[in-house]
Amino acid sequence: MWKLWRNRGLGARFATRLVIGGALLLLAKGFFIYGLFQETHTANLERRLARVADRKVQQVEAALDHSLKLATMLSRMPDVGQFLETFTGMPTARINLVEYETRHAALRTMLKDATGYADLMLLSPGGELLFSIGRSVRIGTHVVETDPTLAAVWKRAVALLQPQRSGLQYDFSTDRLVGWSVAPVVRAQASIGMVVLRIPPHLLDPIVLDPDDLGKTGETVMVTTRQDQAVLLTPTRHDHAAQTRQIRIGNGPEDFPMRESVSGRSGFGRAVDYRGVAVTALWQPLPSVAGGLIIKIDLDETEVPMVRLKQGLFWVDGAILLLLIGIGWFMARPVVRPITQITRMAQAIGEGRFSETTALEGAVGEVCDLAEAFQTLSAQVQKSYQEATEKTQVLVQRLAEMEAAREEMQREISRLRKSEARLSSIGENLKSRLAVWTEQIKQQSGALSDANAELAYFAKIATHDLQEPLRTISSYTQLLARRYKGKLDSNADCFIDYITEGAQRMKQTLRDLADYAEVDARGGVHLMASCDVGSLLREVLSEMQQTIHTRLEGVVSYNPMPTITADPGQMTQLFRHLIENALKFSNGRAPRVHISVEVSETAWTFSITDNGIGIESQYFDRIFQSFQRLHPPGKYPGTGVGLAICKRIVNRHQGKIWVESVVGEGSTFKFSIPKISGDATSAA
């Protein structure tokens, strides 16, 4: 496919691109017009169905209100009141049948002519029949008990002494719509009877069967609910006789409008009706019949304008594309023919046939200028070709000279290779000497390690041997204090205290010196292991609990800590010295110490922050030296070796330790432990 396109001429390429560009524009235009028209068409259809629905709701309300108003008017007629006053409360056996028939006939003629209702009854306050236009029920029959719908509206009218209307239900036993309007006949604020009108069963049929701007397939469906079924209150337009009156309401698309309308919700959209046909529907509740109203039109009818629009866009776009093809070919032809001739002349020039360059046929405008320029170029190429031939001869001569120079260069390369062999021999000699020097360095390194071990052992033995006479001095000094304290003069007591205090400081100094020496003796790569810093801190704080909480009333907190690779013993010693240092310089306040950690790609950086007296910046380096104290011996305890031990431990782990401080606000001691491959990367 790519080869076919690549071999196409300029005219075909131009026409193809013009058609593709035009097709894309037409496609975008078609989508835009179709979407805009569809949105407008849908909005207009919704407004149209909404107007029809509102009009039919008003018609239904008016028809039902007419029945209630008629019952109210009859209840206020004097003849009706006189009839009820005459026969209400009279036992059936005592009624004068001649008088009853005479009054009944006169009232029946008057009411039938005035109302046109065939189902009109007058009932006593107890619900017995006194009058009926149709005379289908015998006088004295308790009509209310035979109809639950009538009984419900009867109770409301009796309780409120006001006209009442029932909802509409479909009576499947009689296959017709059932509804009642009841109006009490009131005398002296008491009911002497009731006017009962049965709503005509076909009262609403003309309203729903009227097409009323719904087209060929549109119809109105009025439904109510009966348990889990929707009941059609009126006939359908498409099938009056065979259509069932009951439709089970499920979760299918055909049940959605009915389910929504009888649930008191309104909406508009596409659905499937009781025939299984796709429709565009609008639904809304209809409280007057305790149900809902659905206005729908078949989707095939509502989509006719959209189908016509699609067809129109297809034909118009096709015509435009054909026109673009013609325009593209017409525009490309004046350019393509001259360029084809120029191509042939270029091939002749490439083969050295300069005499075949002729004037172009049909070239106009810029293409004519191009032809003239091409002919000028042809003359220049011919001249250049001659010059190139002469220069080629010169180049051949120079090439022979270069060949002679190349042979000379080969001889020089041979000489350089011999020199390279001598240099290689010298390199081998240097490599053997380097191996000897490396072995000597290893031996010296081993000797240095042995010397360090002997030095550490010497320090341990020295501190141990020095502690023996120190214990003797301390024991006898304590004995002097117990026996002669207060028996000698005050100077003697001071001297004893000085000796005791000095012995204790000397003892602590020797212990710290031993710890300082053991850092090198115990440290090393072979002791590195997985170290849970959180667990380590809990052990250190548990050992120091008496000092922190009871004696100093301090608080030591820490963030979640990681698991690192280090010497667990030395890390425990490091944290103990730094926490003791933070608690010691509290300046009389309750010490607050917080331990945190920061993670980078190469190291863990721990921080121990306190609220102590702080350190001046000029002493930041001095405090990490052995036996360096910034305060008199009696003011703060310690020998000045603790921070030196900390620095030695951190150095053993290839890390760095430093301090940041503000005088009077506290200090933050920080140290970093480099990461080793396999270290945990998250704090725990």
Image (tube, rainbow, N blue to C red):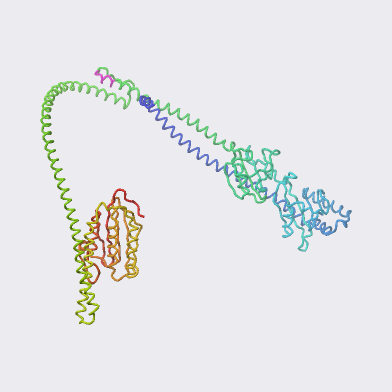
Residue 350 colored in magenta in the image: yes
Q: Quadrant of the N terminus?
A: top left
The percent coordinates of residue 532 (x first, y second) are: 33, 55
| Pick the front one: 353 or 511 | 511
620 to the left or right of 683: left
Q: Residue at x 25, y 19 (%)?
A: 351
Q: Is residue 326 above or below residue 569?
A: above
The percent coordinates of residue 285 (x first, y second) are: 62, 49
The percent coordinates of residue 289 (x first, y second) are: 67, 50
Q: Which region of the structure is painted magenta?
A: 345-352
Q: Is residue 645 above or below residue 430?
A: below
Q: Is residue 218 above or below residue 364?
A: below
| Pick the front one: 557 or 478 | 478
Residue 210 colored in magenta in the image: no
| Pick the front one: 414 or 237 | 414
Q: Main secondary structure of the magenta part?
A: helix
Residue 17 occupies quadrant: top left
Q: Quadrant of the C terminus?
A: bottom left
The percent coordinates of residue 133 (x first, y second) are: 81, 50
Q: Residue at x 20, y 21 (%)?
A: 385
Residue 188 occupies quadrant: bottom right
294 to the left or right of 597: right
139 to the left or right of 306: right
Residue 28 occupies quadrant: top left
Q: Residue at x 52, y 34 (%)?
A: 310
399 to the left or right of 679: left
